[in-house]
Image (cartoon, rainbow, N blue to C red):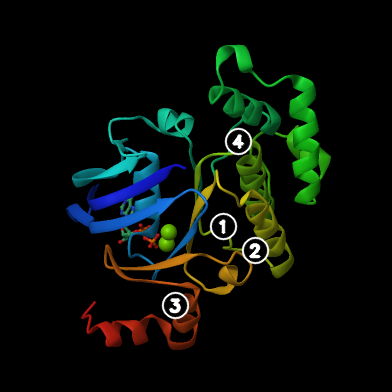
Amino acid sequence: MATLEVKNLHVSIDTQEEGRQEILKGVNLKMSTGEIHAIMGPNGTGKSTLSETIMGNPTYQVTEGDILLDGKSILDMPVDERARAGLFLAMQYPAEIAGVTNAEFMRAAINARRAEDDQISVMDFIKFLDKNMAVLDMDEDMAERYLNQGFSGGEKKRNEILQLMMIQPSFAILDEIDSGLDIDAMKVVAKGVNSMRGDNFGALIITHYQRLLNYIVPDVVHVIMDGRVVKTGGPDLAKKLEDEGYAGLRDELGLDI
Ligand code: ADP
Ligand code: MG
Ligand code: MG
């Protein structure tokens, strides 16, 4: 079992207009493999900041607190080292990379997590790729195309889930993977994530809407507002938010934000 813990995390960014700004103001969160947690919250409250900071995007400066993987701080690790340690981030806006095919990218990512004498063979890779692409109902030629180049919004999201299934991280952070997806594409994405469920996998699903959580049912739901986790509960918390809105929760908690 692996654990991921975010402890009293404070994060600032330097903005051109307003100088240095604190975005996360003491976030606490703990999860283990075998669990799926959801993070919900209004737009602009720091959800993407949290995921980018966990992955090590240097734009986001940690001024206080820690992020621990299996009890060890990862703050000094660059992005690629965090990925090798078992973290995976599916971004709200996946990057396009010219000159590297999707398949090449995934094989390199898989092998980066394996010892030198345990690299995946081309045959095994292709078998595994075919199997996962079938689960996601993806066109075969997607593997040979340059990473995300000319992919539609829906194809990019599906491809992020394919990468997830291929790389098999300990923890995946899925930032708004439902944005811009129609209901059928969302069901396919959910099918892929649900196929990963098990003792060796945990996910942090970030979403503004409850909709996705009908298909990927979380064990725990956290609500972030103004840079803090203001409430943690079970799947029913997501439903309550859908019914009453974030304003309802603000009133309930007596928050003036
Ligand atoms: P969410 O994902 O919850 O919508 P974000 O984490 O993207 O929120 O943003 C939180 C706040 O931080 C917003 O006010 C946003 O404008 C600001 N912010 C985040 N990233 C940057 C950045 N790279 N440059 C400037 N402002 C940023
Ligand atoms: Mg946003
Ligand atoms: Mg966001």
Q: Disc 3, disc 2: CB below 8 Å?
A: no
Distance, label 2 to label 4, CA atoms, is: 23 Å
Q: Which mark is residue 237?
A: 3
Q: Position of residue 182 (x, y in %)?
A: 69, 67
Instruction: Report the Cα–Cα distance between label 4 and label 1.
Output: 17 Å
Q: Identity of the amino acid at label 4?
A: Ile
Identity of the residue drawn at 29% across and 87% down: 252
Q: What is the number of the mark on residue 152?
A: none
Quarter of the picture holding the C terminus: bottom left
Residue in the picture at 65% in, 56% down: 194
Q: Residues within 10 Å of mark 3 (few under 14, many from 20)?
A: some
Rendered image quadrant of residue 17: bottom left
Query: Mark 1 Cα within 10 Å, few/some/many (few <14, many 20+)?
Result: many
Q: Earlier in the sequence, mark 4 or mark 3?
A: 4
In this view, 231 is above or below 7:
below
Query: Contact, CB < 8 Å: mark 4 with mark 3?
Result: no
Mark 2 is on which residue type?
A: Leu
Which of discs 2 and 4 lies nearer the camera? The answer is: 4
